[in-house]
Amino acid sequence: MFWVRDSMFWVRDSRFGVPGSRFGVHRSTFSVLASSVVCCAIAAACSKSVAPSAQAPAATAASPAAAGAPPINSVVGKAPSAAGAVAIVVLEPRTPREFPAQTEVPVMDQVGETFGPELLLVRTGQPVEFRNSDDTLHNVHVMHEDTHEPAFNVAIPTGSSYTHTFTRDGFYHVGCDIHPAMAASVFAASSPFSAIAGADGGFAFTDVPAGAWRIVVVAGQRRLQKDVEVGQGLTQVTVE
């Protein structure tokens, strides 16, 4: 209980440790204490309003699927492999299609009197660059393996390059007349979907337009093909 007089107030409460005691406090001191009590109460109330557990979870960006992005059409499969032969897989359209031009120019280089890569996949009708990064003069002699028709035969000095566009699908033999031990191959396809199968025969193509396609597998002397209908999402196929 409190009694307030002109300059003093008295408290009678057993909670202060001295039952029924009387003690005096100046009014100015009481004002300071009262202000401190009010500030502490406000601080406690504010701290409760911003407690981490009461905060709403942060918003997250929508995933492509949630945003309504169309699925990527993929063709995944397995091709048979011939012993010691590389299997090349080509996805050809069964109806006429127009494809955009390639975004990167494939390159075959010459370093240490060796062509690299040993097998280069290219697009028919699109440019291919042949470089000489070696410290010696080379010539690049290319001919179609089936028809033996020469594609070109040019000398390429050190640090120079030559660009050629193949006009016929198929395998091409690449050699250097100056260094007969040098040899490589080029495989040209009109379709932009061509790949070298893995050691287990696995292959995959993405961003394939829906429709009628034909999978062609070339492995050594073997040539296999299988028709496939590509739909939305994933299409799986096995070529036997």
Image (cartoon, rainbow, N blue to C red):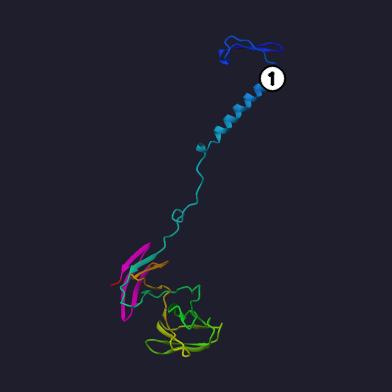
Main secondary structure type of the part rendered in magenta: strand
Q: Position of residue 80 (x, y in %)?
A: 30, 73
**Is 184 in the magenta?**
no
| Kind of residue sitting beneath label 1 | Thr
Read off the magenta span: 211-238
User: Which residue is at a point 38% across and 86% down the rendered structure image?
Assistant: 145
* Residue nearest the viewer, comparing 9 with 49: 9
Circle 1 packing at 10 Å, graded few (<14), some (14-19), many (20+), is few
Q: Residue at x 56, y 15 (%)?
A: 15
Quadrant that contains the N terminus: top right
Query: In which image quadrant can residue 122 be found?
Result: bottom left
Q: Quadrant of residue 47?
A: top right
Q: Which is more toward the observer, 223 or 190?
A: 223
Q: Position of residue 50 (x, y in %)?
A: 55, 36
Horizontal relation, residue 190 to residue 220: left or right: right
Q: Which residue is under mark 1?
A: 29
Whole-percent x and y of residue 165? 48, 82
Quadrant containing the C terminus in the rendered view: bottom left
Comparing 106 with 22, the one in front is: 22
